[in-house]
Image (cartoon, rainbow, N blue to C red):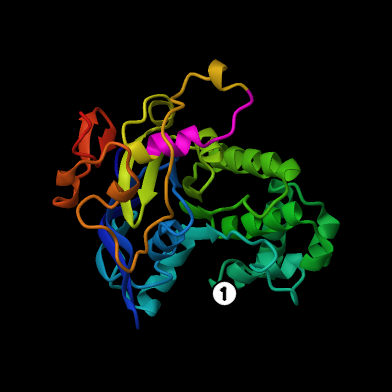
Amino acid sequence: MGNPVLSLAELEMHFPTRAGLVRAVDGISLDIGAGETLGLVGESGCGKSTLGKTAMRLTRPTAGSIRLDGIEISELSRGALRPLRPKMQMIFQDPYASLNPRLTVGRTLEEPLRVHGRGNAAERRERVRWLADKVGLRPEALLRHPHEFSGGQRQRIGIARALALEPKLVICDEPVSALDLSVRAQVINLLMDLKRDLGLAYLFISHDLSVVEHVSDRIAVMYLGKIVELADRRTLWTRPMHPYTQALIAAVPVADPSAVGRPQSGTLGDDLPSPLNPPSGCRFRTRCPIAVAACAEREPELRELAPGHRVACDLVA
């Protein structure tokens, strides 16, 4: 992989509440290389978006390390972070709420350039026109406001804004979940084209495993604040080892299950446990079809069981 663009080591993000401590992110270590897409998948409420926002340093982590392009940023102040912000940008889930309704598209795309002092007025206008063209927006769109666009077009605006400062890393937080099925493929293909053309690294967060499998080089599976499996997309899709991953893949709808070369067994019983009071030992044991008594006594480590394939389960080998 070489030097990773983003490196997380034992990252924790805990939130104190009246009911107790919410361990949204609890000791996660991940690396993302230049030009790589790492997919992050799991059920709603498992901590995926919190991990993305913490990696972006939108919130200060409780503990652990965040290295961006080799620079430790976990403890930096807002002022010290400011010159590093252009290297990492985010595409948000909701294209309706993430754009300022008072600004035209042109001003929206120019804002990050102006804030970070990039170029003069003429150079910024040229950059804005280039960004619009890159994401498939017509020049006249720059004079309009967000409410005049469809959801897919608004997400294209959000993508263009994320690219304005030439980042190395883009965190995509459920970027297509709020879109109609008819436009999801267009936005996904746009993201993949931009990655190829601009050499971007993506952290692609989604609860939809089929989307993550399509766009990712590697996939990390998250459950209750922990990574339970990490592998390249082909291996994870065809030879998942963790019972949770097997259940997620089995739940993906297919037209003809008998014709698909992937595991079809495994179901998820009961609801996701509360992060306020996760189960002892293995956090998945209360829903796991192969759990034994010893699973309650020891938290499994994320072990490498094959080259590049890491699994947090003591019952698989």
Camera-nearest residue between 59 and 50:
50
Camera-nearest residue between 157 and 172:
172
Q: Position of residue 152 (x, y in %)?
A: 73, 52
Question: In this view of the protein, can residue 30 be seen by the observer?
Answer: no
193 relative to 83, above or below: above
Taking the magenta stretch, the answer to whether it contains residue 247 is yes
Question: In this view of the protein, can residue 219 be seen by the observer?
Answer: yes
Q: Residue at x 74, y 74 (%)?
A: 101
129 relative to 115, above or below: above
Q: Position of residue 52 (x, y in %)?
A: 43, 59
> Which portion, as a residue range, is magenta?
245-255
Camera-nearest residue between 264 and 138:
264
Residue 224 located left or right of residue 211? left
What is the residue that sits farthest to the bottom in this orientation?
Answer: 18
Mark 1: which amino acid?
Val
Taking the magenta stretch, the answer to whether it contains residue 175 is no
Residue matched to label 1: 115
Quarter of the image for residue 195 reads top right
